[in-house]
Image (cartoon, rainbow, N blue to C red):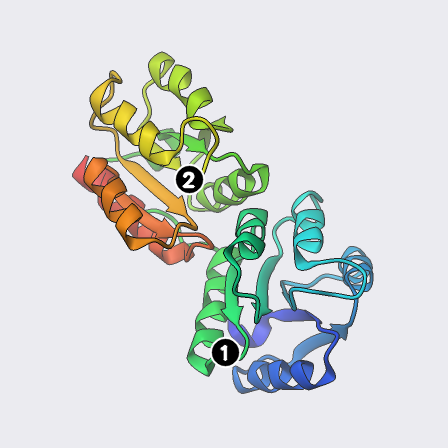
Amino acid sequence: MKTLSELSVLMVEPSKTQAKIITNELKDAGIEHIEYVTTGTEAYQHMKQKHCDLTISAMYLSDMSCIDLVQRIRSDDDLMDIAYILISSETHKEMLEPVRQAGVTALLPKPFEASQFRRALYNSLDYLEPDAIHLENVIVEDLEVLIVDDSTFARKQIIRVLSEMGIEHFSEADSGASAIPLIEAKFFDLIVTDYHMPDVDGQALTDYIRNESNQKSVPLLMVTSEGDQSVLTTVQQSGVSAICNKPFEVNGVRTAIERLLAEF
């Protein structure tokens, strides 16, 4: 298992002042392997030529946005495992939602608190090397899991993390509507779903599973960027077993899965 001091970090930051602030925080955390570029193109070329564990970037770069860079990384089989922290002063939900869906591992405000930064670093470690799921009387390798999300990047990210935790069998659906026939055709040990999806959203899918499907008691984990607590309360009352934020904390997802499957 890597430690913080062993992380190699690539910083993508056009502001020298912000780069200095982040560098100081990294060094305070014991990280010394830090390289620095200013554009998305330089970052991508650097990652292709030289290994890094973690990329930290601003939202807006001179040649592309963070969304473009994250999507390029997540689409590249050689780079998709890199952890990614976005630090941004952007607050508009419509701008941040594509970033969450693209597969960042942490999203921090600008300015950020040292405790927030350190937590994001530890979550990056967990993302790189997740601990295995431990369950008594359950063979984790035999679990059948359905991932429902309209974002290809989000599905790839959760499957990558759960695979590292020991799960081997996955089915995928890109919407609630396409998940329904899968649920009717096959029994699952766990369903992981997003909330925001076209046609049949996460709540509608939950209502269907709990009231109409042939596996009404299946554990249902929602990983979502939805921040409206009243919406989340309604979803939970509909029968979601647990809710995790997107970007998700790896330990939180593992703990939720262990609890849900132990209770099932």
In this view, the residue farthest toward the top is 185
Image quadrant where residue 84 sits: bottom right
Residue at the (22%, 36%) spot, across then down: 238
Q: Does dot 1 land on a helix, a strand or a loop?
A: loop
Residue 79 visible in the snapshot: no
Residue 62 placement (x, y as % from top left): 79, 66
Location of mark 2 (residue): 194
The amino acid beneath tag 1 is Phe
- Residue 23 vertical position relative to residue 123 in the rendered view, above or below: below
Q: Does dot 2 land on a helix, a strand or a loop?
A: loop
| Residue in the foreground of this view, choosing between 223 and 263 | 223
Q: Is residue 235 left or right of residue 157?
A: left
Q: Residues within 10 Å of mark 1 (few under 14, many from 20)?
A: few
CA gap, disc 2 and disc 1: 27 Å
Residue at the (46%, 34%) spot, across then down: 197
How many dots with numbers?
A: 2
Image quadrant where residue 205 sits: top left
Residue at the (49%, 28%) spot, across then down: 172
Location of mark 1 (residue): 112
- Residue 88 vertical position relative to residue 64 in the rendered view, above or below: below
Residue 183 placement (x, y as % from top left): 36, 19
| Residue in the foreground of this view, choosing between 142 and 126 | 126
Residue at the (33%, 29%) spot, across then down: 204
The amino acid beneath tag 2 is Asp
The image quadrant where one finds the C terminus is top left
Q: Residues within 10 Å of mark 2 (few under 14, many from 20)?
A: many
Q: Earlier in the sequence, mark 2 or mark 1?
A: 1
Q: Is residue 88 left or right of residue 240?
A: right
Residue 262 placement (x, y as % from top left): 20, 41
